[in-house]
Amino acid sequence: MSFFKSMQISSAALGAQRVRMNVLSSNLANAQTTRTAEGGPYRRKDVIFSATPTGGPFEDFLDDSMNSQLSEPRVVGIHQDTKEPRNVFDPTHPDADKNGNVKMPNVQVMTEMVNMIAATRAYEANATALSEAKNMAMKSLEIGR
């Protein structure tokens, strides 16, 4: 296993967490959006991750034989929440129905903020891991001098 493998895994995780933060930002930005192109209120979205084996078939065979197959995170999709929108009584809202109810997005701001903090921490941890792998590789090169 090389330093490049750990850098590859950390950089894949950085990319996956960046996508997650973008989706969370979209959820927060649209927490009050009652009209979308599809019609109706905005629906919360969430990222689906998958652990994907690293390397090619030969590398995977070698890793399997040493019981050390490694995986990197990949975004395999973005799931749209199926929960029903919230009904809020606001007869002054332009999108209110005849009873004065408005269908609001199913986004809970506090939940999205907690998820954003978790994504930020994961991003920071992977940035640190990438930096440390680079430092270890540089130290290895210094030994050869």
Image: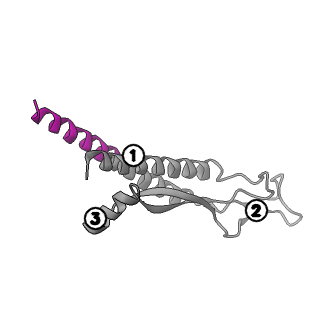
Residue shown at the point (81%, 57%) measured from the top left: 39
- Cα gap from disc 1 to disc 2, whole angstroms: 40 Å
Q: Nearer the viewer, residue 12 or 106?
A: 12
Q: Nearer the viewer, mark 1 or mark 2?
A: 1
What amino acid does circle 1 point to?
Ser
Determine which of the numbered discs, if any, sits on residue 23 in the image.
none
Few, some or many residues within 10 Å of mark 1 (<14, 14–19, 20+): some
**Seen in the image, is 30 located left or right of residue 115?**
right
> Which callout, 2 or 3, points at the residue further toward the start of the chain?
3
Near-viewer residue (96 or 114) = 114
The residue stretch that appears in magenta: 127-145
Q: Where's residue 123, x and y in %?
A: 39, 48
Residue type at mark 3 is: Ser
* Mark 1 lies on residue: 11
Q: In the image, is residue 137 part of the stretch drawn in magenta?
A: yes
Give the residue at mark 3. 68
Marks 1 & 2, CB-CB < 8 Å contact: no
Image location of residue 61, percent across then percent down: 34, 64
- Picture coordinates of residue 21, whole percent (x, y): 51, 49
What amino acid type is highlighted by mark number 2?
Answer: Lys
Give the x, y percent position of residue 91. 82, 58
Of the numbered discs 1 and 3, the one sitting upstream in the chain is 1
